[in-house]
Image: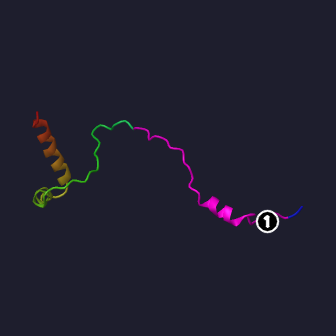
Amino acid sequence: MAPTSRRPANPKDAAEALFKPVKKATTQAAERPAIPNAKELVSLKIDSDVLAHFQADGPGWQDRINDILRAAMKQLP
């Protein structure tokens, strides 16, 4: 039995095969059911004095902003 060579017959073809883009099967992301009262991370630009006002009372300032926005939302028609 002759030993097999570890080198490919054509190195250029072997190198090109390594760098060919792999086609992945695309699958649609499964929608998860909405969790009631779940918080969502957002980026929000507000004036610095408004932020300072809410942060002045210490931790929980994000919850206080959320409570005020919810109250304002309920007052809208």
Q: What residue would you read off at disc 1?
A: 5
| Residue plotted at (89% across, 61% down) | 1
Which quarter shows the C terminus? Answer: top left
Q: Give the colour scheme of this rendering.
A: rainbow
Residue furthest to the right: 1
Amino acid type, label 1: Ser
Q: Residue at x 26, y 51 (%)?
A: 42
Residue span colored magenta: 3-31
In this view of the protein, which residue sits in the foreground, 22 or 30? 22
The overriding secondary structure of the stretch rendered in magenta is loop
When asked about the image quadrant of residue 43, the answer is bottom left
Residue 32 lies, in percent from the top left, at 39, 38
Judged left or right of residue 40, residue 45 is left
Q: Position of residue 60 (x, y in %)?
A: 19, 53
Check if residue 24 falls in the magenta segment.
yes
Task: Give neighbour class at mark 1: few <14, some 14-19, many 20+ (Cα, 10 Å).
Answer: few
Q: Taking 63 as reference, is 72 left or right? A: left
* The stretch drawn in magenta includes residue 13: yes
